[in-house]
Image (cartoon, rainbow, N blue to C red):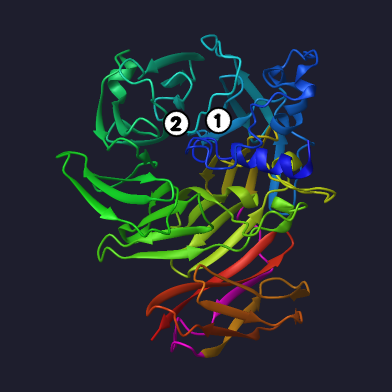
């Protein structure tokens, strides 16, 4: 297979619940179902879950290297090959639970002993990957997870070490239970392709009754994950690249309201409630995430840093506008929003109070999911699932057979801020501002600032010569230019720098007048 073919084929697969299902919008010329000469050869069995993939695809789906680490992230390799871990959660004892989409099993990791335990699911008879996006731990020592192939919600009893399956497919063969939220003793599950939100009574399930109600959406819409705030359920129904509508439904009265979202939102999967009741949306179809102000009903766009070259490679030169693809999001106890930049192989954290952003590189990379060519240490690990535990973020790497942990308490070498909270610039004019760079450690740092914006009308010029940061604060100039055709209004721009394994950035507000 040609180098460029690997990239296009891998790209069609990499957002399994979104991009692959949305009318196969990527080119069909290199469809992954094509039979190659290699797959026509006799299959070599390994006696492991890797046998669910043909030999020529095992490195792509089962991992290309050992677990890796850097100063912020430590990874752990799962003992069984090719389990394809996906959703992940933390129980009340600090144990890390995660689903294995290529085995149907649930596994647990003890962060003290560093031991894995995998629990065989005797009810599982599939010989393929089934996506298990949602997982939730309840205080009665149960782990619940969703499964798209069976169209079911599964319960694993930790004390009894047993599985129970509750199916939703009796009246709907399109059902795709995805993410799980929990509120008022009910599971709230978005049915990604079945045009509904499932509201499932926990007590009924424990009594072996599958009792549930639904919130219906029109045919042809996908649904995002559900977030809850003060009896209100929030989710987005959307058509890829066409329409996105935020829905607010009262849990008690079932009364709903709809709010149209900007056309720039292409694939809104992640939805979370942040400080002050604002709704935060991760857009998998771009490099942006959004804030919807629930009081003034205004939407604000925030763009991430550009993806690093090693995450996509571009050996063929076909990739003109690489994007990061923010996928899911959650808020920690400090009010910070975490999200995965799926196509950039990063975990990111955004502080809404200071409007600052940290983007951490994940060490493992699988080159079969990028256009790497001869580029070494290139690719992505397909990090979809992540969970918060105090100052740690646990995550899974779907195609590297790893779980990992990011320690957010590790000191970042510098911090950035922008001199002015709001910068007014007239159409057709430019303005120089200062970026405040403050050392947080004693190490010498040479940095070059970069800028990013979602507006094609705004340009950011930064110095090309590195700034040497020693033991004092530096004020680094940048120039912001506004095209004469820029629509009046407010815009967010990102100013940051890439250091070893982390990108450090801050947002500024531009008011075009």
> Would you say residue 246 is visible in this rendering?
yes
Q: Nearer the viewer, residue 2 or 333?
A: 2
Mark 1 element type: strand
> Would you say residue 160 is visible in this rendering?
no
For marks 2 and 1, give the CA distance.
9 Å
- Looking at the rendering, the stretch of residues picked out in magenta corresponds to 407-429
Say which quarter of the image contains residue 88: top right
Q: Is residue 174 above or below residue 229?
A: above
Q: Which residue lies most toward the front here? A: 29
In the rendered structure, are the residues bearing label 2 and label 1 in contact, judged by CB atoms less than 8 Å apart?
yes
Look at the image and say whether residue 264 sits in the magenta stretch. no
Q: Residue at x 68, y 49 (%)?
A: 362
Rendering coords of residue 239 (x, y %): 38, 45
Q: Is residue 124 above or below residue 11?
A: above
Residue pointed to by mark 1: 97
Rendering coords of residue 35 (x, y %): 70, 23
Crowding at label 2, few (<14), some or many (≥20) Cα neighbours within 10 Å? some
Q: Residue at x 82, y 51 (%)?
A: 375
Look at the image and say whether residue 420 sits in the magenta stretch. yes
Query: In this image, 210 relative to 110: left or right?
Result: left
Rendering coords of residue 242 (x, y %): 39, 50
Query: In this image, 387 relative to 189: left or right?
Result: right
Residue pointed to by mark 2: 137
Q: Is residue 216 above or below residue 272?
A: above
Q: Earlier in the sequence, mark 2 or mark 1?
A: 1
Q: Is residue 261 above or below residue 5?
A: below
Q: Residue at x 55, y 77 (%)?
A: 417
Q: Which mark, by number, is residue 473? A: none
Mark 2 element type: strand
Q: Residue at x 36, y 50 (%)?
A: 243
Q: Quadrant of the N terminus?
A: top right
Query: In this image, 30 relative to 64: left or right?
Result: left
């Amino acid at each position: 297979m040609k180098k460029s073919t690997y990239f296009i084929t891998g790209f069609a697969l990499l957002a399994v619940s979104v991009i692959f299902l949305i009318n196969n919008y990527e080119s069909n010329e290199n469809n992954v179902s094509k039979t190659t000469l290699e797959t026509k050869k006799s299959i070599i069995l390994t006696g492991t879950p890797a046998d669910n993939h043909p030999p020529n695809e095992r490195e792509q789906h089962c991992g290309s290297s050992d677990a890796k680490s850097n100063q912020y992230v430590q990874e752990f390799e799962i003992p069984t090959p090719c389990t394809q871990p996906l959703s992940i959660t933390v129980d009340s004892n600090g144990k890390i639970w995660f689903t294995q989409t290529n085995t149907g099993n649930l596994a647990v990791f003890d962060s003290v002993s560093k031991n894995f335990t995998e629990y065989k699911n005797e009810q599982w008879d599939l010989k393929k990957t089934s996506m298990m996006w949602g997982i939730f731990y309840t205080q009665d020592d149960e782990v619940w997870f969703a499964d798209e192939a069976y169209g079911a919600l599964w319960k694993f009893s930790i004390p009894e070490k047993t599985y129970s399956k509750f199916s939703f497919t009796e009246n709907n063969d399109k059902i795709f239970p995805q993410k799980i939220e929990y509120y008022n003793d009910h599971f709230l599950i978005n049915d990604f392709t079945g045009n509904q939100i499932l509201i499932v009574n926990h007590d009924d399930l424990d009594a072996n009754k599958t009792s549930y109600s639904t919130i219906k959406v029109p045919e042809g819409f996908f649904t995002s994950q559900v977030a809850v705030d003060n009896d209100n359920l929030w989710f987005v129904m959307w058509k890829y690249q066409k329409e996105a509508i935020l829905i607010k439904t009262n849990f008690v009265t079932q009364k709903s309201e709809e709010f149209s979202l900007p056309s720039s939102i292409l694939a809104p999967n992640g939805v979370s409630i942040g400080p002050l009741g604002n709704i935060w949306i991760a857009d998998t179809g771009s490099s942006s995430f959004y804030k919807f102000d629930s009081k003034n009903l205004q939407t604000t766009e925030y763009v991430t840093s550009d993806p690093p070259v090693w995450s996509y490679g571009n050996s063929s030169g076909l990739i003109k506008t690489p994007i990061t693809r923010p996928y899911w999001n959650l808020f920690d106890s400090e009010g910070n929003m975490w999200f995965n930049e799926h196509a950039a192989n990063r975990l990111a954290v955004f502080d809404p109070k200071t409007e600052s952003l940290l983007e951490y590189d994940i060490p493992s990379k699988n080159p079969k999911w990028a256009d790497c060519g001869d580029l070494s240490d290139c690719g992505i690990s397909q990090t979809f699932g992540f969970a918060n535990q105090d100052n740690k973020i646990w995550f899974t790497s779907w195609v590297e057979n790893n779980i990992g942990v990011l320690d957010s308490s590790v000191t970042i070498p510098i911090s950035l801020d922008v001199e002015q909270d709001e910068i007014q610039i007239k159409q057709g004019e430019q303005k120089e501002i200062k970026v405040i760079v403050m050392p947080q450690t004693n190490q010498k740092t040479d940095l070059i600032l970069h800028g990013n914006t979602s507006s094609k009308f705004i340009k950011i010029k930064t110095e090309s010569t590195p700034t040497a940061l020693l033991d004092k604060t530096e004020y680094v100039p940048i120039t912001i230019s506004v095209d004469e055709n820029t629509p009046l209004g407010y815009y967010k721009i990102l100013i940051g720098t890439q250091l070893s394994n982390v990108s450090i950035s801050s947002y500024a507000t531009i008011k075009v007048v």
